[in-house]
Image: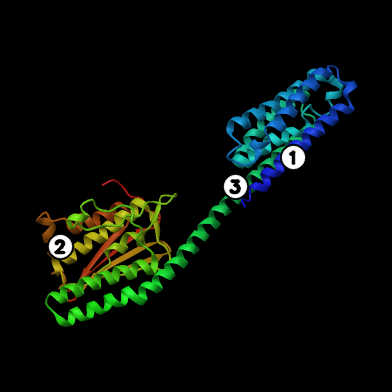
Amino acid sequence: MSVELPLWRALAGYRVLTMLYAIGLCATRFDLFVRPWIAVGYLAVMAVWTLATLPKVRNAASCTKRFLAADLTIALTGILLTPLADSHQRIAGGPTLPSIWTAGAVLAFAIKGGWRWAAVTSTPVAFANLVERGHPARDTVHSLILVWVASIAIGYVVEVARASERTLARALEIEAATRERERLARDIHDGVLQVLAMVKRRGTALGGEAAELGRLAGEQEVALRTLVSGGLVPVSRVSQDAAAGAVVRAVEEPADDGRVDLRSLLAPYASGRVSLAEPGAPVPLPALVARELAAAVGAALDNVRVHAGEEARAWILVEDEPDGIIVSVRDDGPGIPAGRLAEAEGEGRLGVAQSIRGRLRDLGGSAELSSVPGQGTEVELKVPKKAKAGRR
């Protein structure tokens, strides 16, 4: 049950009880009104409106802005009609025609829109009361402050309750998804992964075409193990050319706050020759930043394939530091001879200069490349957690 539902029920009860209170108050002093027909007419309208609109205060969806505006208008009208129905002497110390029923209109705004709506709605109510009294009497000011504080407090509680509900719902979804993933992981581990591992071993031992089959089985084993262990690859879009043999990339859609988990963008790079090590918890980054960083990793792996050969192995390490994210890409290739990068840049080959360093520079980060001939190459990419993707 929603935590808001009891508040809406309480508001409906409050409106009915305060309507009866206002009618009873009018009945006890009916003979003292200067124009009693005004009071009777207004209270009749207020009673019909209150009873007819009880379904409107059932929940936030049915409590529309149009209804709230009309409800507030009726409350303000009752306050401003009080001087016409009562004498000036009695107004100075008596209640208005709607009395405390007016607070129900303000509370409806508070439950519907939170404390900001409550604060804004309290302003015309306060102004109408001051106009009705003609001067800021002490009891009037006290009553207005009480309504203002109470409505803002209730609005704030509603906002906190809604945020807590969203958090709880998300936690329950994650728990359910985790349980299902663990169940699937057990079943897959007991069957599919063991078969793929056996095919890889047997294929490698047999050689020839069987070795290629074993290599493919090994890549699928790594990809499947990554998927079932963390559920990191939510396939939102794939290449339209996938049927023609194009590389298929999983792309995570941004969450409501515009952030994505970097791990989900790096997971598709894992294969039989590319190992991925990442934190056990999500690594959230702004969507554009995460995609630029993942693209830089992809460019580094492209360099491994081109310069170190198809048989070279590579390792991706993701580190979530307090002040930034560090992604390291290391390979076991022959390394880069001294001065080769500067020479390539002079020849117009800007893979490292633009695809890697240029991207990181636009993010406010850095890309450090270290290579020892015969011992492979390592690219270390650093981005601050508050990085924003700039224009390229």
Position of residue 47 in the picture relative to residue 121 (left or right): right
Which residue bears the numbered disc 3?
159
Q: CA distance from mark 2 to mark 3?
A: 56 Å
Instruction: State the residue position of label 1.
Output: 14
Give the amino acid type for the residue marked by disc 3 in the picture.
Answer: Glu
Dot in front, 1 or 2: 1
Q: Residue 341, which numbered label?
A: 2
Tell me if residue 213 can be seen.
yes
Q: CB atoms at circles 2 and 3 under 8 Å apart? A: no
Give the mark toward the camera: 1 or 3.
1
Q: Earlier in the sequence, mark 1 or mark 2?
A: 1
The residue sitting at 41% across, 50% down in the picture is 258
Residue 71 horizontal side relative to residue 295, left or right: right
Where residue 241 appears, as percent x and y from the top left, is 20, 52
x%, y% of residue 237? Answer: 30, 52
- SS state under label 2: helix
Amino acid type of the residue that numbered disc 1 sits on in the rendered structure: Tyr
Q: On the image, which quarter does residue 13 sit in? A: top right
* Residue visible at 67% across and 43% down in the picture: 8
